[in-house]
Amino acid sequence: MESPCLDLLNSDWHDHRGTGRTEDRLRHPAWVRDFVARWGFADAGRPGPDDVEALAALRSLVRRMVDRLQAGRDPSDRDLAALDRVLARAPEVIHLARTTDGYRLEPAPLRRDWDWVLARIARSFADLLAGGDPGRIKVCENPDCGWVFYDESKNRTRRWCEDVCGNLMKVRRFRERQKAAAGHRSVDGHEEHG
């Protein structure tokens, strides 16, 4: 599942290969421009430094909530109230829209500014909590990665954000077993010399 809140969370990038390299992609204007374009936020205009800081603060808030969910706890009342304040930054009106087979009600923002962008991102996370299954919001089990994803697997057992992390973890476990087996042979005095 793709969502602006997941994209924002994962802008705090860590090299999943274990190099220790990290990158805050919010500090890269090209990444922010791509993010804005991808999620249809271009009407808000070019983000200023305060807007980027507000994105970083929202990312920290949502990550704190995700970490609590990952630990089997509900988000704190304080964090829920903080998310509500972000949601309230962009009031909406209801618009009646014509469709090919009738009509539908659509929310429309009163203004399309950076408050609206923050509220839309917060709304995407609130939708995952209220309209989805909070137990499906997961953090990749690769300790070098930490990306957040929504587990859409039928049996809710997905453990990694991507197959790349899953494969890396399988290779690491294989190597650890090989190393342990080699160490065990050395201790038993059965190590072969060639």
Image (cartoon, helix red, strand yellow):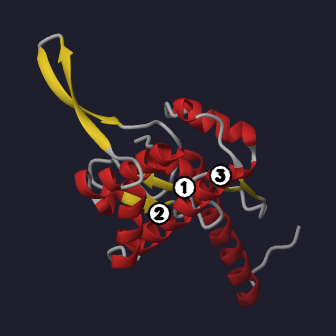
Calculate the distance from the C-alpha at mark 1 to the C-alpha at mark 2.
7 Å
Q: Is residue 47 left or right of residue 117?
A: right
| Nearer to us in this view, 113 or 60 | 113
Residues at circles 1 and 2 in contact by the CB criterion of under 8 Å = yes
Q: Which amino acid does the dot numbered 2 rest on?
A: Val
Residue at 80% x, 74% y: name it.
Answer: 192
Residue at mark 1:
9
Q: Earlier in the sequence, mark 1 or mark 2?
A: 1
* Callout 3 amino acid: Val
Q: Is residue 58 above or below residue 105?
A: below
Q: Is residue 157 visible?
A: no
Tag nearer the camera, 3 or 2? 3
Q: With 112 as the anchor, is 143 left or right in this view?
A: right
Residue at 59 percent of width and 57 percent of height = 54
Disc 3 designates what residue?
Answer: 52
Q: Identify the residue at horizontal 31%, vertical 41% (top origin).
A: 92
Q: What is the CA distance from the residue labelled 3 to the residue labelled 2?
A: 15 Å
Q: Are marks 1 and 3 in contact (CB under 8 Å)?
A: no
The residue carrying mark 2 is: 62
- Quadrant where the C terminus is found in the figure: bottom right
**Front of the two marks 1 and 3:** 3
